[in-house]
């Protein structure tokens, strides 16, 4: 069985990319006003080449201060605290073409060493309503990358996210859980 066909299970969503798209399409849209706060992230395995990479490098989630002030990438610092990193420095072109590079020995340690250098206090995305797959819903639009994270609501405190990256043939899925703290 190919990796993309292997079923995955995370909460109320499971399966392949097609299964995740069907679940995404069946969820209600996410409202901009309900997204303020910090959200803990977790990958949703669908056999995508990027599955598990964010977690491998210490991804914590996202923070939405208001629609104009969004920190799309929070990573844990050495003490385990979530800190915003600049996504503009992410090697997405390289990862899109050669995702296995991120799994090479030493890449996690190299990223940990570089993490303090890419920390930022500046927002790097905005929240907007977009039409995606025929539904108007909240989306996170990155300022300097060809990335849009589109959201649908699984529950009041859980979002199903779909990363739409220009040049990537199929979407990457993730879950966001509202951080009660």
Image (cartoon, grey):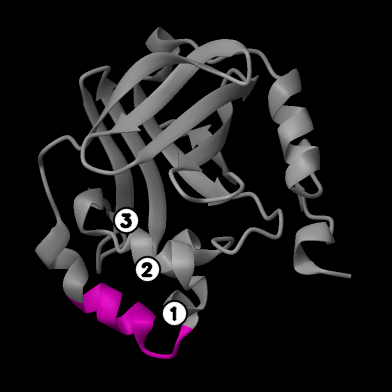
Name which residue lies at 89% across and 70% down: 1
Measured from the top left, where is residue 62 in percent x and y?
Answer: 36, 39
Residue denoted by label 3: 75
Q: CA distance from mark 1 to mark 3?
A: 20 Å
Question: In the rendered image of this protein, does residue 98 appear above or below residue 128?
Answer: below
Secondary structure type for disc 2? helix
Is residue 162 highlighted in magenta? no
Disc 3 crowd, CA 10 A, few/some/many (<14, 14-19, 20+) = many
Marks 1, 2: nearer the viewer: 2
Residue at 84% across / 56% down in the picture? Answer: 7
Q: Nearer the viewer, mark 1 or mark 3?
A: 1
Residue 133 in the image: state x and y as whole percent. Answer: 62, 21
Q: Which residue is mark 1?
A: 101
Which mark lies nearer to you, 2 or 3?
2
Residue shown at 76%/20% (left/top)?
26
Q: Residues within 10 Å of mark 1 (few under 14, many from 20)?
A: few
Of residues 53 and 34, the one nearer the viewer is 53
1 or 2: tag closer to the N-terminus: 2
* Magenta range: 104-113
Alpha carbon of mark 2 to alpha carbon of mark 3: how far?
20 Å
Q: Quadrant of residue 64?
A: top left
- Label 1, label 2: how many angstroms apart (C-alpha)? 8 Å
Magenta stretch secondary structure, dominant: helix
Q: Residue visible at 37% across and 78% down?
A: 108
Q: Quadrant of the C terminus?
A: top left
Q: Is residue 85 visible?
A: no
Asked whether, in this view, residue 26 is left or right of residue 55, the answer is: right
- The numbered disc on residue 94 is 2
In this rendering, the answer to whether 56 lies above or below 101 is: above
């Amino acid at each position: 069985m190919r990796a993309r066909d292997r079923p995955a299970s995370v909460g109320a969503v499971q399966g392949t990319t097609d299964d995740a798209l069907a679940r995404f399409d069946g969820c209600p849209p996410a409202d901009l006003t309900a997204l303020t706060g910090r959200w803990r992230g977790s990958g949703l395995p669908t056999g995508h080449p990027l599955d598990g990479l964010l977690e491998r490098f210490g991804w914590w989630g996202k923070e939405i201060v208001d629609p104009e002030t969004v920190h799309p990438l929070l990573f844990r610092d050495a003490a385990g605290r979530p800190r915003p990193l600049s996504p503009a420095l992410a090697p997405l072109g390289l990862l899109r073409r050669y995702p296995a590079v991120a799994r090479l020995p030493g890449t996690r340690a190299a990223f940990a060493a570089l993490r303090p250098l890419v920390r930022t206090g500046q927002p790097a995305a905005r929240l907007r309503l977009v039409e995606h797959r025929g539904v108007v819903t909240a989306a996170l639009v990155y300022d300097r990358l060809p990335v849009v994270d589109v959201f649908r609501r699984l529950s009041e405190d859980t979002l199903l996210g779909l990363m739409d990256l220009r040049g990537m043939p199929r979407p990457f899925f993730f879950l966001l859980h509202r951080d009660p703290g």
